[in-house]
Each structure stands twice: as C-alpha cells, then as structure tokens.
Amino acid sequence: MKDVQRDTDFYHLRFNGVDSGDISIATTRPEMLGSCVAVFVNPDDARYREYVGKTVSVPLYDLKVKVLADPYVDPEKGTGAEMVCTFGDQNDVDLWRKYSLETRIIIDNDGRMAGDSIIAKGIMSTDARKAVVEQLRSHDYIIKVEKKRQSVNVHERCDTPVEIGILDQWYVRYLDLRERMDEAGRGIKWYPEFMKVRYDNWVHGLKVDWCISRQRVFGVPFPLWYCNKCSEIVYAAEEMLPVDPRFTPYSGKCPKCGGNEFTG
C-alpha cells in the first residue's frame, strides 16, 4: 500500500439534535454515513462542551448516535466535530476500539455498498458518493462544500483506494518481541549503514501482530479445518502434510462436539 495526494470535496453536513441543538460535521466520505457510530469533539473545544453526552441523528438514516469527547480530535480541522464510522480510516478503527463502539458494516468484501446501507445499495463504494450527495442536497443536509487536498491509502500497483473490513485472520504474535528485535539490530554490522535506519523504522513502526493469512487467489492454504457444527478448529496431523484443506476433506470427528462435517 502507499499514500497518494488527491483533490476532493469536503462536505459540511448538518446532524439534527435529538436532545440538543444541531451539530455540523465535515467529511470527505458522505457515502459512509450509514456506518456512523458516534460523533467526536475535542474535550477542550468550548463550542461543543454542551453537546458531549447528547444524541444526534445521522442524515438520511434512521440512526441516533452519541456525541463523545476525545483529545485526538483536532478543533481546527473542518468544523471541529467529526463522525466515526466503521470504517472510514485508521482513526475510526482506533476510536471504535477505544470506546467499544458498535459495528455497522456498509461496504462488503467486493467493495459494494451493502449491509446497513439503504442508499446506493449494490453500487461500488467509489461510485456511491454521487448518489448519497444527491440525496443530501435534496434533503438540505449540506451546509457547504470546500475543496480539500487529502492523503489517500491506495494499492501500490492499481491505485485502488483501500477499504477497511472485518475478517477472521491468523496472526503470529511478535509485538512483544520489539525490544529483542531492537537489541538484535544493534548487534548487527550493517552494510550499507543506512539499512540500519530502515530496520529501526520498521521495528519502531510495528503496530499490529504479523498477519499471515491472505484472502487472495494465490494464498498459502493453512492445514486446518473448521467444524461446521461448533466452529472448533481441527489441525492436520504431521503425517498428513502437505495438505490443502480446500480439496482434501477431514475424515475424523470433531474433538469438541463429535461432528463429522468440516470446512477447509
């Protein structure tokens, strides 16, 4: 993945107050409204102190969300109030995790509007913005539109914007090894020397464990099966290796529930 700079529209939208006055947020992704789970403001922003803990309604959707406060929010960006969706970007993920917010998935694994979306359903997320903006305009939710230069995370080969989803993955735990990796790096004689800087940047930049599973055509199959009855994981015995569980069925019984049907 890589970051590219792109020009886009910055939409200032009105969220109607349920037990308070209206509040406006600014977003470059109005198509994500259906996945909004909260509105955040900075706790030191005097403009919004009376809103914290109150409820507002999401434009176009029958959704009510709380206004919460977190120091992460930049009072100088946009209106100083921002919506958190599941998931527009990594900041959304961080706040969703920190405050244990609910999950509303609006983009499916094929990149189409789905799930909790009621507008532009079935349309590619890259094309859905136009349809959502038309609805926002017709219902008078748009306060103003500004031009904005933004950094977008895209695939390094095709420049397709990257969407964040929720999928079961397999990880190798190594975040707790960062100090040892740092120490090991200091004990290596580096040629050329600048490669030590690259190694240090990698170690210090680690934020999640190593994801070793891949949802792609040419992925490496894991030698395990899931019980269809209780979802217990059954691993291939050493004498069965190598094995591709997609094409080789498991012939034993589930050690947990005794089931005999499995998915590889």
Image (cartoon, rainbow, N blue to C red):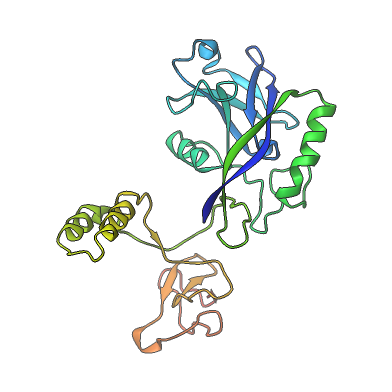
Residue 257 visible in the shown view? yes
x%, y% of residue 127? 76, 48
Q: State the residue in front, 203 or 230.
A: 203
The residue most toward the front is 192
x%, y% of residue 181? 22, 58
Q: Which residue is drawn at the image coordinates 51% and 78% (left, top)? A: 260
Is 98 drawn above or below residue 109 in the view shown? above
**On the image, which quarter does residue 146 sit in?**
top right
Residue 113 visible in the shown view? no
x%, y% of residue 90? 50, 43
* Total marks in image: 0
The residue most toward the right is 138
Q: Which residue is drawn at the image coordinates 58% and 63% (left, top)? A: 157
Is 102 drawn above or below residue 153 in the view shown? above
Answer with left or right where residue 203 lies relative to residue 2: left
Q: Which residue is drawn at the image coordinates 18% and 60% (left, top)? A: 184
**On the image, which quarter does residue 62 sit in?**
top right
Answer with left or right where residue 135 lies relative to residue 176: right
Answer with left or right where residue 22 lies relative to residue 41: right
Q: Which residue is drawn at the image coordinates 50% and 70% (left, top)? A: 227
**On the image, which quarter does residue 98 sit in?**
top left
Q: State the residue in front, 67 or 75.
A: 75
The residue most toward the bottom is 239
Is 188 drawn above or below residue 101 in the view shown? below
